[in-house]
Amino acid sequence: MNQLDALKQFTTVVADTGDFKQLAQFQPQDATTNPSLILKAVQKPEYLPLLKDTVAAHGNEAMDAQIDRLLVRFGCEILASIPGRVSTEVDARLSFDTAATVARAKRIMALYEAQGVKRERVLIKIASTWEGIQAAAELEREGIRTNLTLLFSFAQAVACGDAKVQLISPFVGRIYDWYKKSAGAAWVEADNAHANDPGVKSVRAIYNHYKRHGIATEVMGASFRNVGQITALAGCDLLTIAPELLAQLGASTEPLTQALSASAALQLDLPEVHHTEASFRFAMNEDAMATEKLAEGIRAFCVDAVKLEALMH
């Protein structure tokens, strides 16, 4: 058995791509997209017609409406190739506007429903700012499921649990990147690999907290740099993995064991934690890594959103 098949015994495997023509070979349950992945996809000749068709049919609409239509078009193509859910992202420029995020999420969902897609098959991706988490809480109460992304800290995960969001995407690789860069020449890769990887440790702490306290929010590790980070989180609810790393897992027959389990988490002595807006903001301020990576992630998605709009002209 290869590592990908072994991983699927413990964890729901999700493909992290806008390149839906690649999906069949890995047979993921779900798929996730973001503005950067869609931008990458539409620059390939086989996906350019989706962009051109969207502009031809809806070029008279406002640009934000055209972008949402393009994202939903990709989402529908992806859903035709997988049995589960697709995640579609709200414009990152709305990351600090609760009301605008709610409105945009509802419009994206309405576009999916107009294509005959049921709500259960769509997760609306929202950045894990305080405002984004409050928007998600409101959407969840109205039956729209959310995926809280750009999640780097325990505080963000706690607030998402309190908001009863469907799923969170803690970013393993970007946490690793920050600590590696911060350590500079003092970084020893072997000492920070697998279970000791700072990104892996962050997800493990969140997973154990959720399971120990009966929080139903799903944990989906994201943003991986290497296969070791993935295998060290075998047993996590879901893992969203780029096609290159899915291929590496599929090509490896190294043994893979379960690293996380809900039953083990129940035995742990972990305090219950909740956050008010003030305590959340203070916890984020105390966490330089999470503060920097959240801001950087939002900025990068905004840049790619602008590039995507430029291609639509």
Image (cartoon, grey):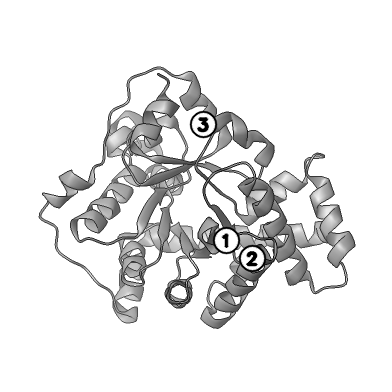
- Give the number of marks: 3
Q: Quick one: label 1 or label 2, which is nearer the N terminus? A: 2
The C terminus, quarter of image: bottom right
- Cα gap from disc 3 to disc 2, whole angstroms: 30 Å
Q: Is residue 313 visible?
A: no
Tag 1: Cα neighbours inside 10 Å, few (<14), some, or many (≥20)? few
Q: Which residue is mark 1?
A: 118
Q: Which residue is mark 2?
A: 113
- Between 8 and 131, the residue placed more toward the observer is 8
Frontmost of labels 3 and 2 is: 2
Residue depicted at x 81% and y 53%: 51
Query: Please, what is the three-letter code of the amino acid marked with disc 1?
Result: Lys
- Cα gap from disc 1 to disc 2, whole angstroms: 6 Å
Verify CB contact (< 8 Å) between mark 3 and mark 2.
Answer: no
Q: Is residue 245 left or right of residue 278?
A: right
The N terminus, quarter of image: top left
Verify CB contact (< 8 Å) between mark 1 and mark 3.
Answer: no
Secondary element under disc 3, as helix, strand or loop, is helix
Q: Quick one: label 1 or label 3, which is nearer the N terminus? A: 1
Picture coordinates of residue 292, whole percent (x, y): 45, 61
Q: Which residue is mark 3?
A: 246
